[in-house]
Amino acid sequence: MQTLEVTDDQYAFIQHLREEISEDVVGKYGYVREQDALQYLIDNLDDDIDLDGEFDSSATDDVAASVGAAIDGDPDPTALEEVAYDETTASKLPDESSVGDDGESATDDEDSAGDTGDEDDVESNADDASGDADDDEMLDEMMSLLETHDDKWAESDSSDHRYTVTLPDGSTEDVQTKDDVRALLFKNYR
C-alpha cells in the first residue's frame, strides 16, 4: 500500500468526511477508516458531495493536544474511552454447596415469614451474573443440535427445499438452510 501525504486542511476534510459517512451511511455500529473516506471520494468523483469547507480540527491540532497532555501529565484528549466491567455481583452468588437440587438455597424456608423484596433482587442479580454461562451453554447446544438429532433431519428429495425435518408429532417440515434445521430442532427437541 502506498502512503499519501496530505495537508492539514485535506486531513481535516477527510476526517469530517469520515464523520459524515459514519453518521449517514454506516450508523452507530460501524467504523469508517481514512481509506474508506478516500475511496468514497474516488467512487463519487462525478457526483456533487455536499460538505462544509470549514472544520474544527486538524492533524496539527490533534498532535499538539496529545503532546500537550503528555507533557502536563493529563490524559490524552484524543484517546478512546476505556470500558471496565463490574465483577462484584459474582461475590454475591450463593455457594454451590448451599444450593439444593431444586435450585433453592438450603437455608431458605418455604414457610419463612420474614420474606422481603430484597431476596428477589439478589436472585435476579444471580440470574444476570449466570446469564453469560447460560448463553454459552445455549450456543453450544444449538451448534451441536445437528449431530445430536441427526436422525430427525435429512437432505430433501424436493427441488424446492434442501432439508426435511421430522417433527415430534410425526409430520415433516421442509426448510432451506441448516440454520432453519437448527431452529426447528431447538424449538421441538430441546
Image (cartoon, rainbow, N blue to C red):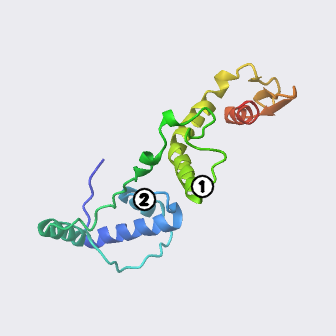
- Residue placed most toward the observer, 153 or 132: 132
- Residue 93 picture location, percent across and down: 48, 44
Q: Residue 32 carries which label?
A: 2
- The residue positioned farthest toward the top in the image shown: 151
Q: Relative to 47, does residue 187 appear above or below in the rendering?
A: above
Residue 46 in sight here: no
Which numbered disc, 1 or 2, marks the residue closer to the eye? 1
Left or right side of 4 for 39: right
| First of labels 1, 2 by sequence position | 2
Q: Relative to 98, does residue 1 appear above or below in the rendering?
A: below
Seen at 52% across and 67% down, the residue is: 24
Quadrant location, the C terminus? top right
Q: Quadrant of residue 33?
A: bottom left
In the rendered image, which residue does mark 1 sit on? 114
- Residue 67 picture location, percent across and down: 16, 66
Left or right side of 49 for 124: right
Q: Relative to 160, does residue 82 appear above or below in the rendering?
A: below
Q: Quadrant of residue 160?
A: top right
- The residue positioned farthest toward the left in the image shown: 71
Seen at 79% across and 25% down, the residue is: 156
What SS does tag 1 mark?
loop
Query: What amino acid is at disc 2?
Result: Val
C-alpha span from label 1 to label 2: 57 Å
Residue 122 in sight here: yes
- Residue 45 picture location, percent across and down: 46, 65
- Residue 68 picture location, percent across and down: 15, 70
Left or right side of 90 for 152: right
Query: What amino acid is at disc 1?
Result: Gly
Seen at 33% across and 58% down, the residue is: 82
* Crowd class of label 2 (few under 14; some 14 to 19; many from 20; radius 10 Å): some
